[in-house]
Amino acid sequence: MADAAGILKRRRPDAVIGCGGYVSGAPVLMAALKRMPTLIIELDSHMGLANRMLAPWVTRVALCFDIPGRSGGKYLRTGRPMSSMLQKADAETGRQRFGLDAELRVVLVTGGSLGARSINEACVDAFGHGPLPFQLVHVSGKRDHAAVQEKLTAAGSDPRNYHLLDYTDELPLATAAADVVVGRSGASVLEVAAQGKPEILVPYPYATAGHQMQNARWMEAAGAAEVIADSELTAERLKTAVMGLLEDAGRRQRMAAAAAGLSSPDGAQAIADEVIRMARGGQEI
């Protein structure tokens, strides 16, 4: 707290922003006690411990999801801050970037930058044997990439429609190219939703306070996602879910519309506008 007080005294900020986690606790609380304008951002559908403790003290709380009991007053539903690439991504550009056929449907499977071993294994077992009736972009994560490649080679996968990547910093383009997205359910589900994509979500089972399952169920309740618990994920279950969506255009369209209604690519702007308004003493921009 003393260090935070010293930084605030030297810097004299017009506003202080916290993004959750213990690191933001001391500086945001100290700023709030000094009656500086303060704002915290909650990225998940469940408020983390630091943000729950800070919420009574701060000026504003920016929410990316609707959270029961957290509305009105200081609470502001802004949506998630997102990459500017999201607004520029479109299906045609995405398919060109990843060398995909414009006429075949696309499934994107990803588990984050490190990858998700259970998803990787189920994906290879479900789709790694011979040619596919669709195109698969599988972002395995760097940790498991070599093992996944070895299994695909042994299984005789067809590299013309099974595209394995260890990592990409152009994920919004891959999402834009996809007809169906399979992945975990951290706060990034809102980025996929903002692009209007149906999702098959496999929540990370050890996420703090089960927030990934809460995010996934929130998406499912809105009609934007299908949820498979990690403990129930098998190759057959994944294959059934993916093929079920690919073969039902009407359901994909309904899920896409529901997803697009849940999220907006303008979350960063909404938060920035609120910070500027607070820094100006509550005056409108």
Image (spheres, rainbow, N blue to C red):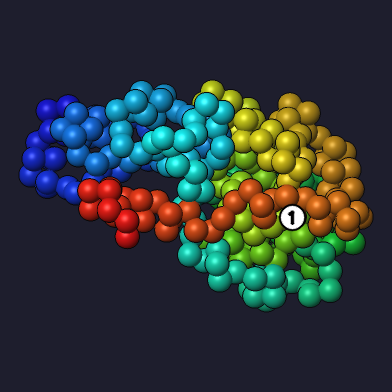
Residue 130 in view of the camera? no
Work out which residue is located at the far front of the displayed protein and give it. Answer: 283
The amino acid type of the residue labelled 1 equals: Ala
Q: Is residue 52 above or below residue 195?
A: above
Residue at the (34%, 25%) spot, across then down:
56
Say left or right for 165 vs 277.
right
Foreground residue, 143 or 278? 278
Residue 243, x across and y down, in percent: 88, 50
Say left or right for 210 vs 253.
left
Residue 263, x across and y down, in percent: 59, 51
Residue 88, x across and y down, in percent: 56, 71
Foreground residue, 45 or 140? 45
The quadrant in which the C terminus is found is bottom left
Q: Is disc 1 surrounded by few (<14), some (14 to 19) or many (20+) residues within 10 Å?
A: some
Q: Is residue 207 above or below residue 141?
A: above
Residue at the (85%, 62%) spot, across then down:
134
Task: Give residue 201's quadrant in the image.
Answer: top right
Residue at the (23%, 53%) spot, across then down:
280
Residue 15 in view of the camera? yes
Say left or right for 49 vs 45.
left
Residue 46, x across and y down, in percent: 53, 30
Secondary-structure class at tag 1: helix
What residue would you read off at disc 1? 257
Counting every numbered tag in the picture gives 1
Q: Is residue 126 above or below residue 234?
A: below
Foreground residue, 30 or 211? 30
Residue at the (75%, 55%) spot, across then down:
256
The quadrant in which the N terminus is found is top left
